[in-house]
Image (cartoon, rainbow, N blue to C red):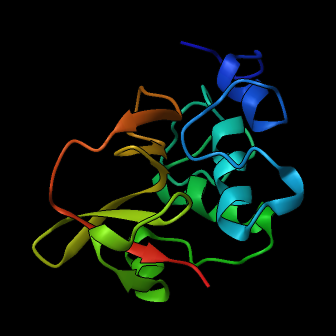
């Protein structure tokens, strides 16, 4: 696993390398808000999780999404639940790379990541872990699009 500050294949792809990464736009000139935010999140691969952190070197889940969208030009609220409330809610069938994925228990939203395509998200998982690309592990998710 790459450590913060080291170059990895995914980081190279996020900054314009020639390696294909799920969810990353291959033509920077055609980059959308969502693809820019996705590229920022991917560039933070290996950054340590820290509760309450919003970057640029440490993140919690909503801190990573807030930071990524801010760098792409859009402000988001601080928490996962507030980000869910701010997003345009969409179906799983309508999701696309760059949409937010909200993990919930009942009506309680407890985690958020950025959809990378192919059933995977970029996220800051938990204490002791790092920002990484991971397969969505549950069906208890909602999707939101930032306009």
Q: Residue at x 72, y 69 (%)?
A: 33
Residue 123: give x, y in percent of width and height.
47, 45
In the rendered structure, the answer to whether residue 14 lies left or right of residue 130 reads right
Relative depth, front residue between 92 and 103: 92
User: In this view, which residue lies farthest toward the right?
Assistant: 29
Q: Is residue 85 above or below residue 32?
A: below
User: In this view, which residue lies farthest toward the left?
Assistant: 106
Q: Residue at x 29, y 44 (%)?
A: 136
Residue 78: give x, y in percent of width and height.
55, 72
Number of numbered callouts drawn: 0
Q: Is residue 19 above or below residue 74?
A: above
In the rendered structure, the answer to whether residue 49 lies left or right of residue 45 reads left
Q: Residue at x 65, y 45 (%)?
A: 24
Relative depth, front residue between 144 and 57: 144
In the rendered structure, the answer to whether residue 93 lies left or right of residue 41 reads left
Q: Is residue 127 above or below residue 107?
A: above
Please identify the quarter of the rendering in which residue 34 is found. Answer: bottom right
Residue 122: give x, y in percent of width and height.
50, 44
In the rendered structure, the answer to whether residue 128 lies left or right of residue 54 reads left
The C terminus sits in image quarter: bottom right
Please identify the quarter of the rendering in which residue 146 is found. Answer: bottom right
């Amino acid at each position: 696993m790459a450590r913060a500050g080291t170059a990895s294949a995914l980081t190279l792809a996020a900054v314009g390398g020639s390696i294909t990464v799920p969810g990353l736009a291959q033509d920077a000139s055609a980059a959308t808000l969502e693809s820019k935010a996705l590229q920022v999140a991917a560039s933070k691969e290996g950054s340590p999780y820290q509760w309450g952190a919003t970057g640029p070197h440490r993140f919690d889940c909503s801190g990573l999404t807030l930071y990524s969208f801010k760098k792409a030009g859009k402000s988001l609220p601080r928490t996962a639940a507030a980000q869910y409330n701010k997003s345009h809610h969409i179906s799983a069938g309508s999701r696309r790379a760059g949409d937010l994925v909200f993990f919930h228990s009942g009506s309680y939203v407890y985690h958020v990541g950025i959809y990378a395509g192919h059933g995977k998200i970029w996220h800051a998982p938990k204490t002791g872990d790092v920002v990484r690309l991971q397969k969505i592990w549950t069906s208890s998710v909602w999707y939101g699009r930032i306009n």
